[in-house]
Amino acid sequence: MVIFWIVYSSQRVPKMYKQRPIGVTIIAVLAILGGIAFLASGLGTLLIPLIGIFIGSGLFILGLAYFLMAYGLWNGKSWAWTLTLILSGIGIIVGIGSIVVGNLGSIFHIIINVIIIYYLYRPNVKAFFDK
């Protein structure tokens, strides 16, 4: 009887799951919004002859990458952690370039990307992504 109860109770234990940190949820939602903005910008830029095709295509691809990143972050995929670092690094570089040409508002974009990179290296966040 005791053996039956041990076997039966061990089958009823639910599987453990990793709880997504709230910051990862926020970054995923922001990534969706960023993906929408990049896709819209890319489609709008495609209407400009010649050079718009190159810039628009790049923006469109970045939009798709942001959607992919949001999916991976939401589901705790290990590759999404790396993709987020890469896209945040690109965001910092683009922000620095924007400041150089006179867009001082890009400093906020840089600060957000630096915060995201810092957050991704927090122990609980790395553990969520199995890093």
Image (cartoon, helix red, strand yellow):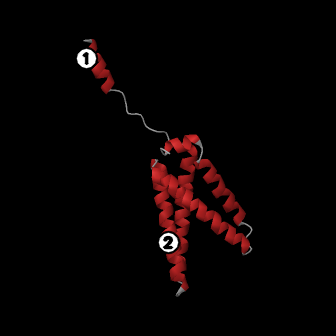
Q: Position of residue 124 (x, y in %)?
A: 56, 40
Q: Position of residue 108 (x, y in %)?
A: 70, 60
The residue sitting at 72% across, 63% down in the picture is: 107
Structural distance between the alpha carbons of marks 1 and 2? 59 Å
| Looking at the image, residue 58 lies above or below residue 8 | below
Q: How many marks?
A: 2
Q: Position of residue 118 (x, y in %)?
A: 63, 50
Disc 1 is placed on an element classified as helix
In the image, taking residue 84 as reference, residue 115 lies left or right, namely right
- Dot 1 alpha-carbon crowd within 10 angstroms: few under 14, some 14 to 19, many 20 or more: few
Residue 46 visible in the picture:
no
| Looking at the image, residue 124 lies above or below residue 42 | above
* Pointer 2 residue: 60
> Nearer the N terminus, badge 1 or badge 2?
1
Q: Residue furthest top?
A: 1
- Dot 2 alpha-carbon crowd within 10 angstroms: few under 14, some 14 to 19, many 20 or more: many
Given residues 43 and 15, the one toward you in this image is 15
Q: Are marks 1 and 2 in contact (CB under 8 Å)?
A: no
Under mark 1, the amino acid is Phe
Dot label at residue 112:
none
In the image, taking residue 1 as reference, residue 52 lies left or right, namely right
Q: Residue furthest bottom?
A: 49
Under mark 2, the amino acid is Phe
Given residues 111 and 30, the one toward you in this image is 111
The residue sitting at 25% across, 12% down in the picture is: 1
Disc 2 is placed on an element classified as helix
| Looking at the image, residue 60 lies above or below residue 5 | below
Dot label at residue 4:
1
